Amino acid sequence: MSGGDIAGLIAAGVFAVLVALLAIPVWKLGKVFDELRQAIRSVSEGTTPLIDEVTSTVSTTHQQLKNVDGITSNVSDASANISALSSLVAATVGSPLIKVAAFSYGVRSALASRRKPASRRRSR
């Protein structure tokens, strides 16, 4: 064996050790990718039913909001009707009631002035 052959054997041995040292991190990286693949699979398996539930909840909520919209529309109509009714009652009853109150005040004033003795007025 010559010096070149020995140097080649040493270089091949060093290269084999270097490959072995680099193979360990690559092998661990492969395990990391396997764990990542399992995590993604479990997340996707858990997400699909969750998305189905959210879709169901949103459609149910939408239906309930339609019902509430109908209720608020009816309440709005009822409040408008009550407002119109109160205006009608105020116009119908209010004016005669004011007239009766004014008449009764006039009668009370007239009766009160008859009961008082005539006050003496002094001329200047």
Image (tube, grey):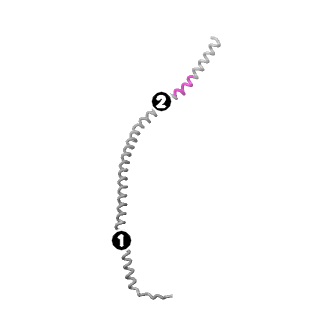
Q: Looking at this view, is 2 or 120 the one in front?
A: 120
User: Which structural element holds mark 2?
Assistant: helix
Locate the N terminus by quadrant. top right
Q: Quadrant of residue 18?
A: top right
Q: Earlier in the sequence, mark 2 or mark 1?
A: 2
Residue located farthest toward the right when viewing the structure as drawn:
3
Q: Residue at x 40, y 83 (%)?
A: 113
Q: Which mark is residue 69?
A: none
How far apart are the alpha carbons under marks 2 and 1?
90 Å
Q: At which x and y percent is residue 46?
A: 42, 37
Q: Residue at x 55, y 23 (%)?
A: 20
Image position of 89 (left or right of 27): left
Q: At which x and y percent is residue 27?
A: 52, 26
Residue at mark 2 = 34
For label 1, the crowd category at 10 Å Cα-Cα, with few meaning under 14, some 14 to 19 and many 20 or more, is: few
The correct choice, above or below, for 94 with respect to 121 in the image is: above
Residue interval drawn in magenta: 19-28
Residue at mark 1 = 97
Q: Is residue 113 magenta?
A: no
Q: Residue at x 46, y 31 (%)?
A: 37
Q: Looking at this view, is 44 or 28 the one in front?
A: 44
The prevailing secondary structure element of the residues shown in magenta is helix
